[in-house]
Amino acid sequence: MIHQDKINASLQRFAARHGLASAGDVKFRAALIDMDGTLYDSMGHHTLAWHRMMLDLGIATDRDRFYLFEGMTGKATINLLFREYLHRDATDAEVAEHYHRKTVYFNEMPPVKPMSGAAQLLSALQASGITCVLVTGSGQRSLIDRLQRDFPGIFSPDMIITAADVEHGKPDPEPYLKAMERAGVSPSQAIVIENAPLGVRAGARSGAFTVGLTTGPVPVEALECEGADIVLPSMEALAGAAASFIN
Ligand code: CA
């Protein structure tokens, strides 16, 4: 348990924030889990698909920039790019057209793999009676539909929050607050598992204990400064430390 001291300190700070006496009083009842770059090793595909979509518009972007947009809905990402490069919002028809093309490019690549350690973590959470809720800004059905196959019996259909369920996507806390509502828990009973700066910001703003995972090129500091309670290097590391969060 190489991360044990760090985890205990972060739980202690979280307990204090919620008016609990000690880390031992923290009882998580729901885990609110992001999908891309967390449950699936899919961010390389996503950044490449976005990059290619922009090339079609004659605009060469830095592919790694898309890791910083991660978590936003497709519509929000396209509007951000349109404002920057074309100095206007995209129309609804343009959003639909470009997001469709980005999705086609994503699906043309070889299937992505579940993140190593993800199944192990989910099983441990479920065995401890913790409700698992998926919270994604994605609207791509290809991965959402695979969840039941790759992680059977973990996510009930009503415990899946996608871009279609929220008015304001990440970094707004709405997706995570909605997930807590569905699971019937308060922020002091919720743990958020994220890999992207904007996703961590959404989790931290929701009041949940927010775990940041550095599964891509984004550095530890970028997740810390968005309010992560703790940053771990991988899903495997979190799975290995799961017992520390479950009591
Ligand atoms: Ca993510």
Image (cartoon, rainbow, N blue to C red):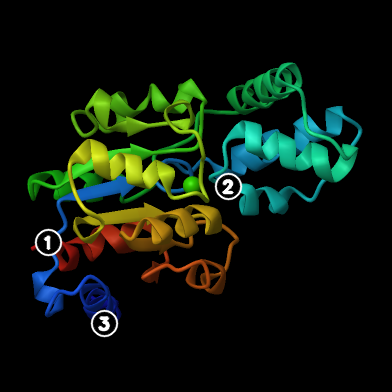
Identify the residue position indicated by label 1 in the image.
Answer: 27
Tally of numbered tags: 3
- Quarter-of-image position of residue 143: top left
- Report if the CB atoms under discs 2 and 3 are less than 8 Å apart: no
Identify the residue position indicated by label 3 in the image.
Answer: 9
Q: Which amino acid does label 2 sit on?
A: Glu
Instruction: Give the mark, 3 or 1, whose residue is nearer the N terminus.
Output: 3
- Quarter-of-image position of residue 40: top left
Can you give x and y, in whole percent of width and height, for residue 230 in the image?
A: 37, 71
Of tags 1 and 2, the one toward the viewer is 1
Query: Up-down: is 129 above or below 241?
Result: above
* Callout 1: CB less than 8 Å from ligand 1: no
Q: Residue 70 carries which label?
A: 2
How far is mark 2 from mark 3, CA to CA? 28 Å
Query: What residue is drawn where x is 45% and y is 33%?
Result: 166
How far is mark 1 from mark 2, CA to CA? 29 Å
- Report if the CB atoms under discs 1 and 2 are less than 8 Å apart: no
- Report if the CB atoms under discs 3 and 1 are less than 8 Å apart: no
Q: 58 or 201: which is nearer to us? A: 201
How far is mark 3 from mark 1, CA to CA? 16 Å
Q: Residue 166 carries which label?
A: none
Asked whether residue 18 appears in the rendered view, the answer is: yes
Query: What residue is drawn where x is 14% and y is 74%?
Result: 20
